[in-house]
Image: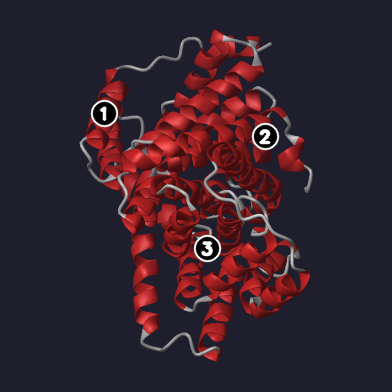
Amino acid sequence: MYNHLMNTAELSLGWDFYGPLLGMVILILLGVRIWAVIGLGSVIMLMTTEVLPATLLGEALFDGVDSFALIAVPLFVLTGDVLVRSGLSNKLLDVAEATMGWQRAGLGTSTVLGCGFFACISGSDAADAAAIGRITIDRLVEKGYPKAYACALVAAGACTGILIPPSISYIIIGLVLGISASTLFLAAAIPGVLVLLSVMVTNFLINRIKGYEDSRGKFDVRHWLKTIWDGRYALSIPFIILGGIYSGLFTPTESASVAVIATLIIGFYQKNLQLSDVPKMLETSAKVSGVIVPIIAMSLPFAQTLAALEVPQYFVYTMTSMTENRHLIMLSMIAILIVAGCVMETTPNIVILAPILMPLALEIGMNDIHFCIFMVSALGIGFITPPLGLNLFVVSGVAGEPVLAISRHAIFFVFSMLAVVIFIMMVPAIALWLL
């Protein structure tokens, strides 16, 4: 099936490649900042392999961040921060609770739905986990959920921050692979909702077994309509963002800027924001951007070095020489992405692994859009998987609960999300149907 790849059999990598790579792994395990590790690894690899001139580094650093699409990242983060400070996030949760709170596991299901609403605005899972966690964890405990489980539920629901559009991760992978973020947002809608539903169903089943919560009641249409009316301003923000993008009226970056202006106007109109709050919100957005942008800047020259060394071709040859079964190859890709997500953040994983895995995906017949949705969905599992598990640490900081205790409960959600990722892998139409 892949006989034409045999021409690449002479490809080989020596210690001039494996040495710097091993050094990077050691530095990551020692806790060195990821952008510094990638930058140092790029310099050493360029010096040892001499595959590209070292002067490439400075040019690549500038070109890597000189992108209009990247402006959307701090803007979406700023929108989420304004949403929290203005109290609009509470309105979203009220709507979620009025919609789902009448069920037996009502508050837990409402919490996950609230995470989905927030994901439609912020595009960041960490912001989602922090905002929803502060509001719901104590309420979940009052309903009968163990605190560690409540934290795990919020952490799992917040994974939709990078899976439901608008998502910062889809902006980055689109930038790296040259694919329109608007197209990826449209393709990600159904897979993102499926992950959200998987977390809801898992919580419902666990609740039935453990008996944590029994909120059974009747659906009150009047109360639901009143809650929607009260939360009309908060609900308008996702429609502005996604409606503008899908209609072609805005680019993702323009949509993010419009969302910032809209949330600020609503906050000032309702007198929940003061001018003195603006510098603090800008500072928060700048801090998040200060984490993401250096990683992107350092990762791109590293990715170029790997491409010059023909690492993607070597990887394709190695994988296809082991098996010709495309499903086994895709399962291997899932394993690689989950392991990578366990030890490294999504941004460097995307910038480094996407150019390596994309040729393999195309070789086995995957569509490029399908691959992007598949990759980001698989990396999303890493947010609730130790040892890195960013969402686990965020909710741990919010609730003061040990990460290990939270991760023990999170394992149920890991398996449910994995089932959805395998489903997306097996049925490409899930990602391509809306296109």
Which of the labelled discs sits on residue 20, or is there none?
A: 1
**How many residues crowd around disc 2 within 10 Å: few (fewer than 14), some, or many (20 or more)?**
many
| Amino acid type of the residue tagged 2 in the rendering | Ile
Q: SS class of the residue under badge 2?
A: helix
Point 55% across, 50% down: residue: 213
| Amino acid type of the residue tagged 3 in the rendering | Ser
Determine whether 136 is above or below 186 in the image: below
Determine the image quadrant of residue 277: bottom left
Contact between labelled residues 3 and 2, with CB atoms less than 8 Å apart: no
Q: Which residue position holds label 2?
A: 424
Q: Where residue 10 sits in the image (x, y, percent)?
A: 46, 10
Q: Where residue 238 sits in the image (x, y, percent)?
A: 64, 67
* Closer-to-camera residue (203/338): 203
Point 38% across, 53% down: residue: 395
Q: Which residue position holds label 3?
A: 122
Point 39% across, 61% down: residue: 289
Q: Quadrant of the N terminus?
A: top right
Nearest to N terminus: mark 2 or mark 3? 3
| Amino acid type of the residue tagged 1 in the rendering | Pro
Contact between labelled residues 2 and 1, with CB atoms less than 8 Å apart: no
Determine the image quadrant of residue 211: top right
**How many residues crowd around disc 1 within 10 Å: few (fewer than 14), some, or many (20 or more)?**
some
**Mark 1 or mark 3: which is in front?**
3
Nearest to N terminus: mark 1 or mark 3? 1
Q: SS class of the residue under badge 3?
A: helix
**How many residues crowd around disc 3 within 10 Å: few (fewer than 14), some, or many (20 or more)?**
many
Which of the labelled discs sits on residue 265, or is there none?
A: none
**Label 2 – label 3 distance at C-alpha:** 24 Å
Q: SS class of the residue under badge 1?
A: helix
* Closer-to-camera residue (195/253): 195
Q: Is residue 377 left or right of residue 303?
A: right
